[in-house]
Amino acid sequence: MGEGIIFKALSGFYYVDDGQRLVTCRARGKFRHKKETPLVGDRVTFTPLEEGTGALDAILPRKNEFQRPAVANIDLLVIIASGAVPVTDPFLIDRVVSIAEGRGCGSLICINKWDLEPAEDLYETYRKAGFATFRVSAETGEGVEALGQAIAGKVCAFTGNSGVGKSSILNALEPDFGLATGEVSDRLGRGRHTTRHVELFRLKNGAIVADTPGFSSFDTEGMELRAPQELQYTFREFAPYLDQCRFQGCAHVKEKGCAVLEAVKAGAIPRSRHESYVRLYQQAKEVPEWKRRQMRGE
């Protein structure tokens, strides 16, 4: 019996890293009967067969899972942003951070292209909100070493809107990757899609990383599954104020006596973060509860 992590899944084959090699596995029929789908990042057990092949036997308990992209057991979501073209909308960051917080997954904010446009406001917003935030330039190497130290030994997923330099940063962290970086279109202001599937890579510092599609496809269904009243717990800087509101069940949108709104007014909570919360709250309210239950399979 072997044990390892699925590093890649293609055309019904699962490539399991057991710490020494990649074992090409097929899933046993019981997975299909149970309607279980192994995901990249799953810790699994398998039976070794001939010539480096194997049969998947079981999926070990998951820490978390995401469907878009299809990946499991992520310790840290590394969100790549940029103050240069293409400029990242903070709402895109906040939406993904909210998903991660709701799944028990850490978040790290990496602001790339610092040599082109120092995005100090963006940096301060997330630093003050309590997130590990890094100034980075994949071009000059600024901040790359510090980023590498922050993710050492963790299973990470790299994401960000197209063109911000996810693959370039991975190449800077591990030059042997040789990942396609693509070019930013001057006309459209966004990058070509150069990452076609999720695949894990092991870095020399012990980190395991995944390069994933951009924000546009990052688990949007995950937001629709969450009830509006649950969103407040996915904005970590709200926590000290949640039990101080005048009225029980406060939505923290425009209510009188809301401690969260007072904290925003005082500058203790970044205004852009609260604006993102309100936007997500309004979106969640538009999903009927019956539809939310249906999507959860209840």
Image: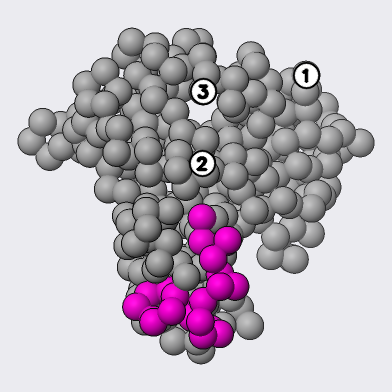
| 289 in magenta | no
In-image side of 59 versus 136 (left or right): right
Q: Which mark is residue 20?
A: 1
Tag nearer the camera, 3 or 2? 2
Tag nearer the camera, 3 or 1? 3
Can residue 225 be seen by looking at this rendering? no
User: Sequence order check: which comes first, mark 3 or mark 2?
Assistant: 2
The residue indicated by pointer 3 is 147
**Point 72% across, 36% down: residue:** 5
Residue 128 sits above or below residue 291 on the image? above
- Residue 14 position, x and y percent, is 66, 39
- Residue 228 position, x and y percent, is 48, 76
| 245 in magenta | yes
Within 10 Å of the Cα at label 3, are there few (<14), some (14-19), or many (20+) other Cα atoms? Answer: many
Q: Which residues are magenta?
A: 237-258
- Residue 290 position, x and y percent, is 51, 89
